[in-house]
Image (tube, helix red, strand yellow):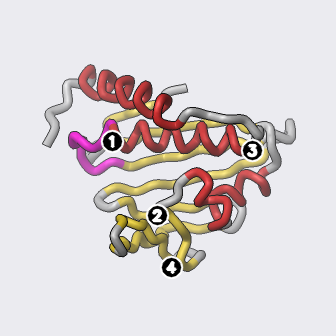
Amino acid sequence: MRAEITQMAKGYKAVFERELAHGSDKVWSMLADNSRLKLWFDELRIAEAGEDGKMVFDMGEGNNEELAITDYEEGRVLAFEWWDDRVRFEVTEEDSGKTRLRLVETIDRITSQTAKDLAGWHVCLDVIEAILDEEEINREEEWQHWHEEYKRLLDSMTVEFE
């Protein structure tokens, strides 16, 4: 399911939700255990967990960007800066034994990169689900599809790209 994107007083908010047929501990490990994190987002890792911690993004060729962790609750919340934007993962175990994984990206301004990022987060969540379900997924094909979808959605919002 596509993210819901809403305009706020300042910026935009994209909300992605997945209901996963796994316990919250397994879902959380996909976010907070670097050995599991690299399976779905190889360039990203937690350098220091905790609310004042930091994420590190490998830009390639030995260049790394530090992204501050802005909110952290063990097993439940991981939020961090995403350059001018913010990303927040929320993990909630439901009575059914399934887990709701929610990703909220707070977007300062829509740019030509935004549809790429939205497609990327969308596919990352699909990959997390596929890994947990022990299934295969064609990342590139899925990304292409969702990139077009998010471009159309942003265009329909008549947003001027900066």
Instruction: Between label 2 and label 1, give the one nearer the viewer.
Output: 2
Q: Within the image, what quadrant is residue 85 found in? A: bottom left
Q: How crowded is mark 2: few (under 14 residues within 10 Å), some or many (20 or more)?
A: many
Q: Residue 132 carries which label?
A: 3
Q: Residue 12 carries which label?
A: 1
Check disc 2 and report the residue beneath it: 80
The front one of 22 and 15 is: 22
Instruction: Between label 3 and label 4, give the one nearer the viewer.
Output: 3
Residue at coordinates 76% horizontally, 40% vertically from top-left? 134
Per the model, the C-alpha gap separating discs 3 and 4 is: 29 Å
Q: Where is residue 133 in the image (x, y as percent from the top left)?
A: 76, 38
Instruction: Between label 2 and label 3, give the one nearer the viewer.
Output: 3
Range shown magenta: 107-115
Q: Position of residue 157 (x, y in %)?
A: 26, 25
Label 3 secondary element: helix
Per the model, the C-alpha gap separating discs 1 and 4 is: 25 Å
Q: Are marks 3 and 4 in contact (CB under 8 Å)?
A: no
Q: Which SS type dominates the magenta stretch?
A: loop
Q: Within the image, what quadrant is residue 95 found in? A: top right
Q: Are marks 4 and 2 in contact (CB under 8 Å)?
A: no
Label 1 secondary element: strand
Q: Are marks 2 and 3 in contact (CB under 8 Å)?
A: no
Check disc 4 and report the residue beneath it: 52
Per the model, the C-alpha gap separating discs 2 and 3 is: 23 Å
Q: Give the mark, 3 or 4, whose residue is nearer the N terminus.
A: 4
